[in-house]
Image (cartoon, coloured by chain):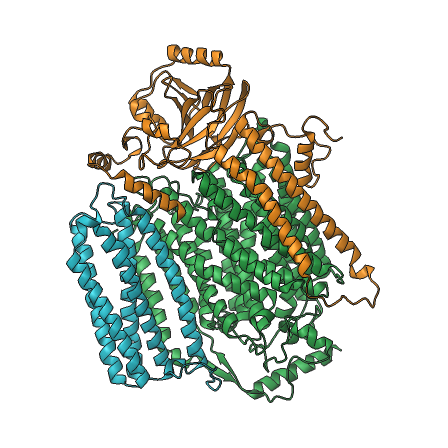
Amino acid sequence: MDLFNFKMPEQFIIMNNPLIIGAWISIILASVGIVFFVTKYKKWGYLWREWFTTVDHKKIGVMYILAALLMLFRGGFDAILMRTQLALPDMKVLDAQHYNEIFTTHGTIMILFMAMPFIIGLMNVGVPLQIGARDVAFPVLNAVSFWLFFVGAMVFNLSFVIGGSPDAGWTNYVPLSGSELTPGVGINYYLWGLQIAGIGTLATGINFFVTILKMRAPGMTLLRMPMFTWSTLVTSVIIIFAFPVLTITLALLTFDRLFGAHFFTIDAGGMPMMWANLFWIWGHPEVYIVILPAFGIFSDVISTFARKRLFGYHAMVISMVAISGLSFVVWVHHFFTMGNGPWINSIFSITTMLIAVPTGVKVFNWLFTMYKGRIETPAPMLWSLAFIPNFLIGGVTGVMLASAPADYQYHNSYFLVSHFHYVLIGGTVFGCMAGLYYWWPKIFDFKLNERISKWAFWIFIVGFNVCFLPMYLVGLQGMPRRIYTYKAEMGWTMWNFVQTIGAYLMGIGFILIVWAIIYSIRHEKRDRSGDPWHGRTLEWAIPSPPPHYNFSRMPSRITSADPYWDAKKRGESMFDENEPLKPIHMPNNDGMPIVMSGFMFIAGFGFVFEWLLIAFIGLLGVIGTMVWRSFKDYDADHYVQVEEIERDQAELQASLEGRS
Amino acid sequence: MLPFRKGAWKWLAVAGMMMAILSGCEPIKTGVLNPKGPVAQQQYDLIVWSAVLMSIILIVVFVLFVVIMVRFRASKLSKDYEPPDEKGNTFLEIVWTAIPVLIVIAIGIPTVTTTFDLEKSPSPNKKPITIEATSAQWKWIFKYPEQGIETVNYVKIPANVPVRFKLSSHDAMNSFWVPELGGQEYTMADMPMTLWLEADKPGKFQGRGNNFTGRDFAKMVFTVEAKKQSDFDSWVAQIKKTAPKQSEKEYKKLLKPGTVGLQSYSSYPKSAEVKNPNMPGMNHGGMDKDEMKDMPGMDHSKKKKDDKKKDDMEDMPGMDHSKMKDDDMDSEKD
Amino acid sequence: MASSSVPKGTPNFPEYQTEEGRLKIFGFWVFLAAEVVLFSTLFATYLVLADRTAGGPTGKDLFEVKDFMIETMLLLTSSFTCGLATLEMRKGNKKGVFIWMITTLLLGAGFLGMEISEFVAYVNEGATLQTSAFLSGFFVLVGTHGLHVTVGIIWISLVLIQVAQRGLTPTTCRKLFIGGLYWHFLDVVWIFIFTAVYLTGLI
């Protein structure tokens, strides 16, 4: 615990593999290219003013989604590498160590740095607009959340090229991840990347909880909130109760690794089993944090494109609350095989199976929303429709896994791997895609190209099933997860090869989605009128993109959960046009979040390498920026004047007339 | 062609769950779906039962889904069709709450009974044999306390005799899995556990470590060979006669991280015996009462890397075990 | 933010005067809920490990009744004086706020000083974070609370500087009030530490 110890890890700069050298080259090229072009076109000021210091929830949402897509690329590339290695027996694409690193980073990135920010990005974009708020409750804190997530992701990804990646799985079980069996900086990267991002997520949970409870437009009672807003509220509660557990769990292992404590060690009374418990007490709610908002998206999208009110709104709310409650009492099902005794295993089997009840209610309610509806199938609806059968496959195998004695046979096999990919891809990723396509023409003034998107969708869906259905079979054949190679005589070759084909198809699907975005930015028709889907909820009542203050007048006349739909049916506007415009109070942009997070990066880096002096300098910087912010808190907002609002409205009017 | 042989309907149920991708393919006859002992058979029955119930749900929902998609596509409907403004249907919603509850009960009851069954010997009237299975980075060590022999990376068992595997780990947590004989349990350094398995007939089965333990985890496979009791006895006698004795030093060397081939020893050092480091007297993890009595007092020597600490531990006068027991129970509930 | 529309039922106190103040106070309560979870996890960990002393010293060997009773009294008293400061704040009495808040901080600093010397004494007796799982749990649980107290002292001091600069405005009052909430929360956590760690450790 020497403050001035600067011991170097075995390898500081990693250069031992063509892939990593490739990563180095692309990182350097990309950085130089970005710096060059931004400088050449003099965009630094623009970036700083409009993005880096923004507190606008819509822009923060966009940055979250961009970062998530980037991480989806990284995590997806990991997956492609793994599938290539496993395509045939005894492949030599990756050696054991690299395979172990890659499945670890794949899992961690996909859950924490892809699914979470994607969902949180969509919350940022959607929720304030859906409830008629001009921003979230704590806009600066929101920016802090984003930048902490971003820095956490950067710290974690740095491991690939500097010091070495974590290699104990995303569950990071001790004693394997303890300092005795896995010395080096890899696990430290895991601990600090997650820790920094996790603090940001906790702040997001608090922020959206307060926003939704305290900032809804007049008339929007709790039971008139759109389902996505409901799901965000429930998710925020889960975040508030689950993420502190992660904070502590990571901190305890950090104490073990850096300072020789004995929480999880085999010797001196430590208790390795406690890691599994603590990890999943956070980890199980965590998967519901990423699935419930997706449920909310599907509810909104399905009722929009079936042109019908959501079937059983109250049951949908109750079932979601029930799922969130159950999510905290099922964690033991992740380790039925740890010798918990028959009573505990039986109880947790039953609680786990019970999750099927509210989830089943939701599935039937979605189906009956479409029944007698008028179903249209643009891209967001396609992803939502695909969700139902695919998620159901994941769901029913989940019930099978919930049976403890049967789980003795599924556990840690590809059966399990397939199950959680069916729920996480079929649920969360499809939900993110549905949300992205759905709200894209709200964030911007154009839709994403339908033709390319449909190709992308079908290739991805086919690839997904080709990749993951056979995994159930090889799982039952006894193939364990996390092995880097297998022998031909195991008889797993054919299905593994098929899976790899599926994985490549998914990769093509992803590339096409990115292509659809690029293509649409250049070619899609612009339309600022704001209601491209004939929407039902408040966000569609304002222009696209909305002004930075969202609502020039506050919406009135909210009498149901589909206020805009009902207003359109009555031939009314959501807004009282006779009401005079008033100056709008808005927060100022703020440089504190990004500066503070920069210091957090330094601190994280210092802790990863156990260079405590650097770590403490970083922490002092974090505290210093917060203190500085506290003293200039008295000058943190401004009023948008009526003239500016009128100017915006005139501009919008001109754009709409120019189009028609 | 569909494989209509004995038990084919069960297989069909599983295949149906996989959305018929298998139709026309050879049924898989390895692993979980090929039970070769009473434990695996019990689990197989549970798997098939749950798969059948789940298939029913899948089929119902899929049919509903397709019908609704076909019937209510906007392009199939007349231009002036307006969806009705309905809020829900309490009766229907009660129905589709009640049905999953019934299904949960239908799976839950056999789940609970099987969970308790698996804690006991699959054939209580037969005299069991005990084998200690220890995982280390990256090999499996099998000790036969009754026979006094030790094997590495392979294990032979008498067929038709219940085997009490005492599972433990030297370092990282692994999982002991022989799919054709029965489900797995973890091997842990701080809590040895018992797993009952039995093979119906002589045969060879693939076993493996199933919980990630680092670099050469993929190579932690072993074969389990079930032999007729007489063959088993003569094999033991042969090992006793021909295989070398294992010294303390050799055992320590074996435990160091690395991979090794198949090995056999006619004896093993005392320090290699599996003990429960933290909690003798605990009755969880499937350890039965008589077994507890056999367990001698605390002995940490097996897994102590730090000799100084080891001495400290052994000097500890009268650790209060009864208290520890409660805490460990608590830790599981926490 | 425009303070015109104060919702019905909102107490007429300076810290609740603005929309921003109301949101932040509510948000801070939610944050405290998260803190409760955080400390619960630490308590659970500690209780699981409490008897795993690995041959090292036990709580009985280490804890001094007199010391932790004094620590408890210091912190409980500071919570009381912190409450008095809030009352003075609502009366708009800047001087009273300073008197009671500085008393609070001094009591807090006294508590902290005693805790640090307690830790130093343990380490000198050979009871460190590295000795056993019990001591790891002890140092991290009690240390996390101590860290919170440290943060509280620095934070409230900074707020007091702002009060000195700007007087008792709705914003500074909100900051003082939130600082006070935090301080009371630390007191509550300490009561649990007092019971679950020290008193239980003596038995």
Judge whether B294 appears above or below C25 on screen.
Answer: above
Q: Where residue A629 sits in the image (x, y, percent)?
A: 37, 74
* Chain drawn in orange: B
Q: Nearer the viewer, residue A156 or A93?
A: A156
Label tally: 0
As drawn, is A497 to the left or to the right of A177? right
Residue B176 placement, left or right of C161: right
Which of these two is toward me, A289 or A646? A289
Q: Position of residue B296 (x, y in %)?
A: 29, 28
Q: Is residue C194 visible?
A: yes
Q: Colour of chain C?
A: cyan
User: Residue A18 or B216: which is nearer the viewer?
Assistant: B216
Q: Is residue A440 above or below residue A477?
A: below
Chain coloured green: A
The residue depicted at 33 percent of the width and 19 percent of the height is B246
Residue positioned most to the right: B78
Q: State which quarter of the image contains the C terminus of chain A.
A: bottom right
Q: Quadrant of residue A366?
A: bottom right
Q: Which image quadrant for residue C164? A: bottom left
Residue C178: image location, x then y, percent = 35, 73
